Amino acid sequence: MIAFKWLGRGAIAPFTGVRWPADGRWVSAPAGAPEGSGVHACRLAQLAWWAGEELWRVELDGRIVERETEVEAERGRLVEPITAWSPAAFAQACVARTIAFASEVPTQEMADYVAMVTVVDAPTASFVSAVAAAAARGPQTAFAEERALQSQWLARALDLRES
Amino acid sequence: MSSRVPDQPTCREIVELITDYLEARLPLEARTRLEQHLVFCDWCRVYLEQIRQTIRVAGAVTEESLSPEKREELVRLFRDWKGKK
Amino acid sequence: MSSAGFDQGELELVASLRQGDEPAFVALVQKCHPSMVRLARVFVTSEAIAEEVAQESWLAVLEGIGGFEGRSSLRSWIFSIVANRARSRARREGRSAPFSSFEEQEDEPAVDPDRFNPSGHLWAGHWSAPPVRWADEQLLLQETLQLTKKAIEMLPPAQRQVIELRDVEGCSAVEVCEALGVSDGNQRVLLHRARSRLRAILEPQLRRTA
């Protein structure tokens, strides 16, 4: 399966600190490792939950578990970096959404979200605008739905396809 | 904010989960939510790193090494025990 | 990773000890004695008594080595001997703190609640006074190590036992449960509290020098 993976600068995994091999070598989870210790990646619809410095196209193999906000595979390898990824453009899109929510629901709370979203980095803007969506539209599903819309935006802006 | 999105942990909740996270004892869903929080929350990332650094410093607390006198005492204890065996 | 795993090196050491091999004993003593004293010191009232407990424990180790079955690691077996002897000694001396009781306080937040926004705030529960990155170089300065040592000594006994075995000695969770006779959950709560306290004590020191 083709999927996408967010990494820190230098293809470093953000939570383990492990550097992913840039030559596209396969990386495997240890055999018999507990649930959650495989290779994590995103389908297009899940991109916005994990925004980081670098975005890579990856190939996954072996047993693949699909979850709400990520997929986990036994094996994965880097295919290529998505060099078109622009945190600034994404952040700007989140700002625009938040401003739109605030004009729908002109409260102090919404104004506070606008003030914040304009000064933070892309991952935080993604979070704040999703919270603003929840505040404007109702909490139960609006947060996750906004994240899904952000993911769609990213997929379109970066012209990503999954096989 | 947490009332707006109840299943998103707050920083206050994150710091209480940090040990279970480092011990790999968080249930998968809680771990996912924690990591999603770390994506945007630089402060909690700093906190996590500080806990890791705390562990490292604790590990560097060197033991007093065994003094020769103490070693001799224990060797005597050993020889006594051996003699009585 | 089970501490009762098949460890060839450890089996050989145990065999040597059974045969009365003095160099093997000395090597083990060099490795373990200061840690044993440190562990005993958590329970008893003085360094001298901790030293006595550690010495008595060595005798118990030698007398018991014939029956050691390797169900736990050698180290956690030795530590459990020390912990038990230290506890008995403390009881005999009338030390009142209940070392094996679960915990002193019901609730102990990892971080002062004042460091987070109160409820009602837009970002309730998020940092209002966030932590500031520590420079790695500051960590291993003598002052930091001294402060850490003192801070660990001042922890409530149950927390001190766990952090000493886990983070100072590098024992695994399983080893600590075996040595102290506590459940994994208990061990983790104590570890959490100990590490949180230690971090909080280090913070003003490390913030200053950053």
Image (cartoon, rainbow, N blue to C red):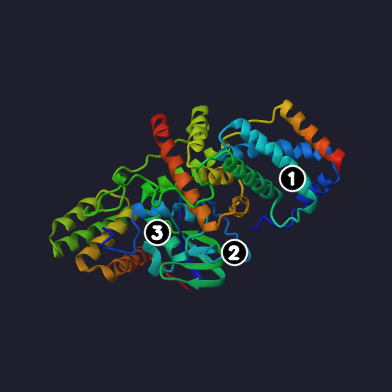
Residues at marks 2 and 3, CA–CA distance in whole angstroms: 22 Å
Identify which residue is drawn at 62% across, 35% down.
C50
List x then y, in percent, for residue C89: 61, 41
Q: Name which residue lies at 59% across and 64% down.
A: A33
Quarter assignment of residue C69: bottom right
Mark 1: few/some/many CA within 10 Å (<14, 14-19, 20+): many
Alpha carbon separation for disc pair 2 and 1: 36 Å
The chain to which mark 2 is attached is A
Mark 1: amino acid: Val
Q: Residue at x 74, y 53 (%)?
A: C7
**Residue B4, percent from left and from top:** 25, 63
- Up-down: is B4 above or below B80? below
Instruction: Give residue C59's position: percent from left, percent from top.
Output: 75, 41
Name the residue beneath numbered marker 2: A33
The reply to whether dot 2 and dot 3 touch (C-beta < 8 Å) is: no
Instruction: Give the labeled residue for mark 3.
Output: B36
Q: Which mark is residue C61?
A: 1
Three-letter amino acid code at the position of disc 3: Gln
Q: Position of residue C65 (x, y in %)?
A: 78, 49
Residue A69 found in image quarter: bottom left
Frontmost of labels 1 and 3 is 1
